[in-house]
Amino acid sequence: MMRRSALLEAALTAVACLAVTTLCLALGSKPLMDIVLRLAIFGLFALSLNILIGYTGLISFGHAMFFGFGAYAFGLLMQARGVSIPVAFAIAVLATAALAVVVGALCVRLTAIYFAFLTLAFQMLVHAIILSWVSLTGGDQGLRGGIPRPVFLGVNLADPRHFFVFACVVAFASIFLIRQILEAPFGYTLRVIRDNADRARALGVPVQRYKLAAFVFAGVFAAVAGILMSLYVSGAYPNFAFWTQSGDAIFMIMLGGISVFLGPIVGAAVFLLLNDTITRFTEYNGLVLGIVLLCVVLGLRAGLLDVVIRLMAGAPVRPASVTTETPV
Amino acid sequence: MNLDALLDCVAASSCLVTQISAGLIIGMLLFLVACGLTLIFGVLGVINFTHGSFYMMGAYIALTTFQTTGSYALAVLASTLGVALFGVIFERFFMARVYGADVLMQLLVCYAFILILDDVAKIVWGADFRAMGMPEAFVLPPLRVAGGFLPPFYLFLAAVTVAIAITLGVVIAKTRFGKIVRAAAANRQMVGVLGINTALLYAAVFALGSALAGIAGALAAPVRSVVPGMGFSILIESFIVTVIGGMGSIAGAFVAAILVGITRSFGSIGFPLFTDGTMFVFMVLVLLIKPTGLFGRRPG
């Protein structure tokens, strides 16, 4: 049973999403649609990572492996003849879930810093396989030749407007599902594990199984984002699974704030805006982004929405202690 | 997969010599980087994700010093001191601020520095591959061992690394500094309570670890191409080395680095598509069978 406020929130978000989608379609402006599409894809990706970082306390530095794997699995299935888009979508998601089960089973048993590094290492393995298995993936050229888009249920993804609506609906449905998962007893169990794993264990929670489940959920939604990305750029590229992709997602979460559900999406918006602006002035965007990141981490010690919420609550901008705020 | 090629190579002594020496060189460089990583983790309890970038800095400093002065000895010295100095600045002014915070903050500070240092390298030295060239002292005909060729620089690199490994082992086992390092690895708070200046200790250990990365960079510069981003792949590999050898163990890092180096060099013949994969399989096996690593103690 959903709480009333949660229901209201969900309805409001739905209306907002619907309004944005219709507005974009009505204006028919290509640049605006591009911005919304990228925000939907990267926002969903960052949000899926926050299931782990913000809610479970698992710092994964390898989340892009699922983004990339989903994109490649989907692209390869579509290029092999005779598969419809929903079927390829489902198989790609299931395959990513299977990958997440294997990687997760190895990683969730480890302490925080090992977990971060091991997920990073597995991501580099996926990246290395994509680069070296040229006959399947096209190596560093990426998956080329375009992704065929047969019409299904009257939806023609070759039409940019159809694709725009499709991507918005999929992204919104995923965000809604993540919200439901995190507000369910399962989500609250994850918070308990994050705050005190020993206590959770004492209460009879199978901690590692819950962590693994969270890892798989996060991987699945990252794959959905990856599939949308592969449709958006009509291909898949090795940098989808490169570690900077994961780093960017953590950056987005940090920018937006991890104590608010929609923080990562706000962070994604700020990040994309920042990145586009910097790229216009200099090719050295890593330098500028790095300095911005240092200022946020060492200066605010929290994301933008965290600060807004603190200010609204009348608390000082910087917390007295250095521990990170966590979602409640 | 190409098992025939692998079997042919194992059967031919010339190929065996070439592959083993290539593997040992990879292993030596990995050891130097992994050793700094494991020392810093042992004493400070943080993993320095920027360590690969320190290695890259070492290589670039060596390249510039060598090309301006022509002296390789000076280049190694400049890399060692330069990177050590940078390590101390990085530790005192940035990492020290997030010791109490959770792992996410430490990761992000390191991530920011990886981005910054890679771009600084691009601005100063350009984005293309650079080659330093072999120092004159080592421009000698390769030695022939059992039909295989052995470049003289390989011997120098191996000798320097083994000397460093032995010195480090003795320092950790016999000196007062070594005792403090071991005590801090066991219990950081207690070392502070006993009146040892931990801020100084942390800076010293960071300087030592960074210096090792700097030396590794300087030793790698003549035999590997120097390029922005070169630090990241060695970071992953040296992490794998520390996992296999056991976090915090220098002897473990040495053995594991050589094992990984040999695995890589033979893997590139036997499983060209899966060279990186062989290392991972190795690491996963160790994690499953002995999670603390071959030489590891229980994590604190």
Image (cartoon, rainbow, N blue to C red):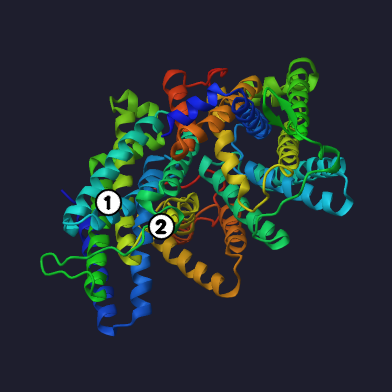
Q: Residue at x 41, y 50 (%)?
A: A134
Is the residue A164 above or below the residue A102 in the image? Answer: below
Of the numbered discs in the image, which one, if any, rests on residue A313?
Answer: none
Residue drawn at point x = 36 percent, y = 55 percent: A45
User: Which picture quadrant has residue A175?
Assistant: bottom left
Residue B221 versus residue A94: which sits nearer the camera? Answer: B221
Mark 1 neighbour density, 10 Å: few (under 14) some (14–19) many (20 or more): many
> Is residue A243 depicted above or below A211 in this figure?
below
Secondary structure at badge 1 equals helix
**Residue B177 horizontal side relative to residue A179, left or right:** right
Closer-to-camera residue (A268/A82): A82
* Three-letter residue code for mark 2: Gly
Q: Looking at the picture, how far across and down is residue B49, in whole percent? A: 59, 42
**Circle 2 is placed at which residue position?**
A142
The chain holding disc 2 is A
Which of discs 2 and 1 lies nearer the camera? The answer is: 2
Q: Residues within 10 Å of mark 2 (few under 14, many from 20)?
A: some
Instruction: List the single residue furthest toward the top.
Output: B174
- For residue A65, say whether it is visible: yes
Amino acid residing under circle 1 = Ile
| Rendering coords of residue A318 (x, y %) | 56, 54
Q: Are marks 2 and 1 on the same chain?
A: yes
Q: CA distance from mark 2 to mark 1?
A: 30 Å
Question: Can you identify the residue that label 1 sits on?
Answer: A178
- Which residue extends farthest bottom? A27
